[in-house]
Image (cartoon, grey):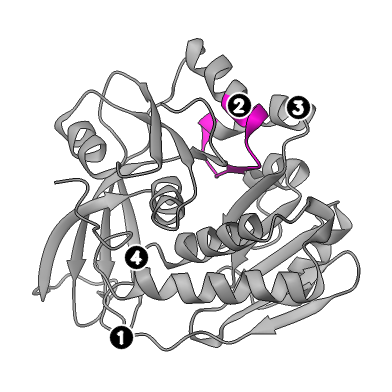
Amino acid sequence: MSSLQDVVVIGSASWNQIVSVDELPEARPHTVTAREAWHALGGTSAGKALHLAQQGVETLCVAAIGDDADAGAIRERLRGPGLYTSFVECTGPSEHHLNLVTPRGERVSVFLHHAPQPVPGRWRSEALAAARSARVVVADLMPIARSLLGDLSAQGAWIWTDLHDYDGTDAYHDDFVDAADVVIMNDDGTRDVRGVMTALLARGVSVVVCTRGAQGAVAMTTDGDTISVEAFPASVVDTNGAGDAFAAGMIAEVLREDLAPGALRGESLRAAMLAGAARAVKALETRDLAPDDGSSR
């Protein structure tokens, strides 16, 4: 591990089975034939870390894994130039999903195994030490990240979090909302995007960005900015990881421009969102979380 990383991403790394089908199955007994199926690295934190490292951002990914064969597959895929990992090794299976996807980008994810629960140990002090020197800390919606939120806030970290399909009311997200300065979410969980974003700002978040698939993305800030960008054209293979790629593109642009937390506004925010939209294409056009640069072979 390098002594310093630009970004520390804390959360999940999983091993997933992806099954492509013509239509998502209806809720009735019947048989479905898959178009194709494959296994791939998963996990929102793994996706962000891969995309950040591939953009030249020194990144540390902190995640809990099990002692099963999937843990070996996760280790093998989650590596590359500028990408460092701190795996918290636990007893039992690693996180594992079954994802049903369609050619139109629809997806249903089934947890076969949830992420293992790490016990307190040396990994905590090591993660906090890395975060102390990082320019951005991403706390993803996992117990391992939740356990560090208070300490991260006390250290003055610039905390970003990804709420995914947040509906504006789920209490599971509260600790992450309260700790974060920048929130990224998508519109899958609500029809009232503006209402949810406004409520997040009222709770102390400085910047909220909502990705909207083919409709692009919209951001709101406590300064009153509302900024929209269009999605970039893409030949969609699999939507898995596109939101993580968007977040990584934004963060990489923020670091390139050397923006301080209070400067993520106006045209600087728009530029970061456009960089995110461009990076999302990289995920959409591959059946992996990120394009395979060959470093894992």
Give the residue at mark 1. 235
Mark found first going from the N terminus, 1 or 2: 2
Q: Is residue 214 left or right of residue 71?
A: right
* Real-space Cα separation, disc 4 to disc 2, in angstroms: 28 Å
- Nearer to us of marks 3 and 2 is 3
Write down the region rendered in magenta: 130-144
* Real-space Cα separation, disc 4 to disc 1, in angstroms: 20 Å
Amino acid beneath label 2: Ser
Mark found first going from the N terminus, 4 or 1: 4
| Other residues around mark 2 within 10 Å, as few (<14) / some (14–19) / many (≥20) | some
Mark found first going from the N terminus, 3 or 2: 2
Give me the disc on residue 108: 4
* Real-space Cα separation, disc 1 to disc 3, in angstroms: 42 Å
| SS at mark 2 in the image | loop
Give me the disc on residue 147: 2
| Other residues around mark 1 within 10 Å, as few (<14) / some (14–19) / many (≥20) | few
The x and y percentages for residue 295 are 22, 48
